[in-house]
Image (tube, helix red, strand yellow):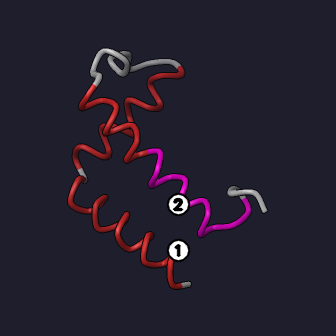
Amino acid sequence: MSALFNFHSFLTVVLLVICTCTYVKLHFPAILEHKTGFRGFFWKAARIGERLSPWMGAGCIAMGVSIIFF
């Protein structure tokens, strides 16, 4: 089933995109310096990951436990 139609999979994809964009921005900031266009979406995801870092970490842990046990 597609990640768009399964809410659990959709949340997993969103968390992974945010965490990946944050990681890329921290290690390679030149890649995500454009705030508009297609790369602007990933810049915004990285910004969410930077500002909500403790909550994103907790969300990733909760999602990992959820995937393993449920």
Pointer 2 residue: 12
Of the pair 44 and 12, the residue shown nearer to us: 12
- Which span is picked out in magenta? 5-17
Q: Nearer the viewer, mark 1 or mark 2?
A: 1
Image coordinates for residue 19, horizontal then vertical, percent:
37, 47
In the image, residue 9 lies in the stretch drawn in magenta: yes
Q: Quadrant of residue 4?
A: bottom right
Of the pair 41 and 70, the residue shown nearer to us: 70
Identity of the residue drawn at 30% across and 38% down: 47
Q: CA distance from mark 1 to mark 2?
A: 9 Å
Q: What's the residue type where badge 2 is placed?
A: Thr
Identity of the residue drawn at 47% across and 45% down: 17
Image coordinates for residue 3, horizontal then vertical, percent:
68, 57
Per the rendering, the mark at residue 67 is 1
Q: Does the residue at mark 1 contact the one at mark 2 (Cβ under 8 Å)?
A: yes
Q: What's the residue type where badge 1 is placed?
A: Ile
Image coordinates for residue 49, horizontal then vertical, percent:
30, 46
Of the pair 6 and 28, the residue shown nearer to us: 28
Question: Would you place residue 56 above or below residue 45 in this image?
Answer: below
SS assignment for the magenta stretch, majority: helix
